Image (tube, grey):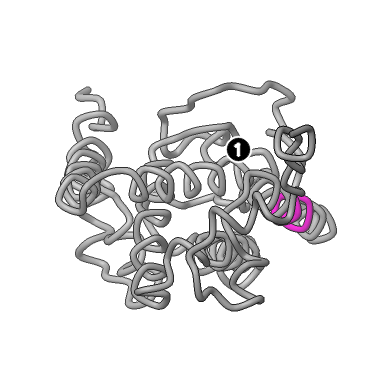
């Protein structure tokens, strides 16, 4: 009777495996979406990003010495130096796009490789942040009307951009596809209306700069409209 009443407790590996679909291969089990795994992947990406940006000469925070949550003036020296600005929504959209990419690549195995998809998203975002702060790309940005005097991002701003990407990735993971698409389109339209710039225009101007678009952007949107003398 005593032997029947005392049941051995399952070990940790058994409990982990119980949450993974039957038939999952060993490499896929290693990438199961445990909270610890996700935290480690994110922390490692942030450390690598900050360290490389520092060696590239980017300042930890704004040269003004002040840390602000928001800066709204696009042509301000503090733009791309503080925690958030008008370009934060574009990084949220990055996350939604990277989620869609991961879902497409790992279709049918999504529940077992979520951590791998997150690592892929972080890898792409961190790589872009490093490229964006390289001298050739900074010089390219300076050709645009809204990026004159741009010297790259502060490390604080760059890490915040990556955090915004993670927010977009998380939203896409929880929201129906049509809601994610609606949010992305709304963000693009809103920032275009307010400052005449968004992710789409940013990419276009970086790859094939247009003087017509630059002239139109220089006129200012609702938020950044020129002051009438």
Pointer 1: what residue?
Answer: 81
Magenta stretch: includes residue 205: no
Residue 172 position, x and y percent, is: 33, 49
Which secondary structure, mark 1?
A: loop
Residue 18 position, x and y percent, is: 57, 55
Residue found 70% across the figure and 27% down from its top: 64
- Quarter of the picture holding the N terminus: top right
Residue found 38% across the figure and 70% down from its top: 101
Residue found 33% across the figure and 44% down from its top: 174
* Side of 61 where 127 appears, left or right: left
Q: Is residue 99 above or below residue 225?
A: below
Label the magenta part by its dominant secondary structure: helix
Q: Picture quarter containing residue 120?
A: bottom right
The residue sitting at the front extreme is: 1
Residue 147 position, x and y percent, is: 45, 52
Res. 138 visible in picture? no
Magenta part of the chain: 43-49
* Side of 84 where 223 appears, left or right: left
* Side of 198 where 36 appears, left or right: right
């Amino acid at each position: 009777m005593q032997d029947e009443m005392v049941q051995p407790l399952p070990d940790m590996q058994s409990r982990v495996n119980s949450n993974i679909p039957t038939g999952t291969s060993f490499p896929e089990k290693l990438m199961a979406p445990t909270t610890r795994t996700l935290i480690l992947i994110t922390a490692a990406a942030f450390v690598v990003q900050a360290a490389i940006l520092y060696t590239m000469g980017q300042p930890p925070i704004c040269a003004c010495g002040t840390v602000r949550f928001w800066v709204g003036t696009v042509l301000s020296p503090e733009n791309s130096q503080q925690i958030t600005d008008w370009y934060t929504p574009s990084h949220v959209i990055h996350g939604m796009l990277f989620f869609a990419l991961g879902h497409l690549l790992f279709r049918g195995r999504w529940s077992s490789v979520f951590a791998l998809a997150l690592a892929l998203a972080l890898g792409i975002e961190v790589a872009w942040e490093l490229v964006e702060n390289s001298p050739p790309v900074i010089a390219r940005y300076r050709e645009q009307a809204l990026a004159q005097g741009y010297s790259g991002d502060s490390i604080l701003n760059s890490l915040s951009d990556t955090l915004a990407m993670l927010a977009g990735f998380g939203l896409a993971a929880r929201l129906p596809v049509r809601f994610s698409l609606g949010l992305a389109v709304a963000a693009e339209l809103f920032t275009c209306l307010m400052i005449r710039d968004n992710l789409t225009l940013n990419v276009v101007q970086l790859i094939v700069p247009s003087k017509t678009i630059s002239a139109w952007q220089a006129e200012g949107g609702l938020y950044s409209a020129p002051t009438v003398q």
